[in-house]
Amino acid sequence: MNIICTMCLNGCEIEVNENKNTVGAMCSRGERFAISEFENPTIMLTTTVKTSFSALPVLPVKTDKCVPKDKLNDIMKIIDTIIVTTPLKVGEVVYENIYDDINLISTMDMTRRIK
Ligand code: SF4
């Protein structure tokens, strides 16, 4: 499996085999990242949720930690049900514990758009 390391801007392409040997990482941090991604692929989920405000009908959000890729469909089903009814600032929780102690948080200051 080939994995692009996202731990720094070098973006090393790292090959991991079934014995968890790696080739291509320029540092041990990248090796650990590649093995972790091989064992349990994760992603920082960024998306939008609906709001009740016509001036800002959707709010950009992200998870505050990486989520397992195989749980994305389950998490998106929850996200599809969310309607934000209170103006939130950057970093405020939109949905607590959306999966395994991971929160969905706002990435926009709604108070600047909604008076
Ligand atoms: S392997 Fe090391 S140097 Fe390469 S992208 Fe990852 S963190 Fe950066």
Image (cartoon, rainbow, N blue to C red):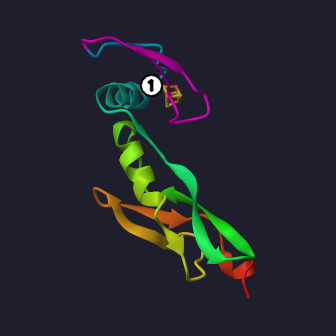
- How would you classify the magenta stretch by its main secondary structure? loop
Can I make out residue 65 in this image?
A: no
- For the record, the magenta segment spans 1-19
Q: Residue 21 versus residue 109: which sits nearer the camera? A: 109
Quadrant assignment for the N terminus: top left
Q: Residue 94 versus residue 36: which sits nearer the camera? A: 94
Residue under numbered circle 1 = 27
| For residue 36, above or below residue 20 | below
Can I make out residue 22 in this image?
A: yes
Residue lying at 60% horizontally and 64% vertically, measured from the top left? 107
Residue lying at 56% horizontally and 83% vertically, measured from the top left? 86
| For residue 43, above or below residue 4 | below
Q: Is residue 15 left or right of residue 111?
A: left
Q: Residue 25 versus residue 91: which sits nearer the camera? A: 91
Residue lying at 39% horizontally and 31% vertically, measured from the top left? 33
Q: Is residue 27 left or right of residue 91?
A: left
The response on whether ligand 1 sits within 8 Å of label 1 is: yes
Q: Residue 75 versus residue 29: which sits nearer the camera? A: 75
**Quarter-of-image position of residue 54:** bottom right
Q: Is residue 10 left or right of residue 79?
A: right
Where does the image place residue 59, in percent across and percent down from the top left?
A: 62, 66
Mark 1, residues whose alpha carbon is within 10 Å: few (<14), some, or many (≥20)?
few
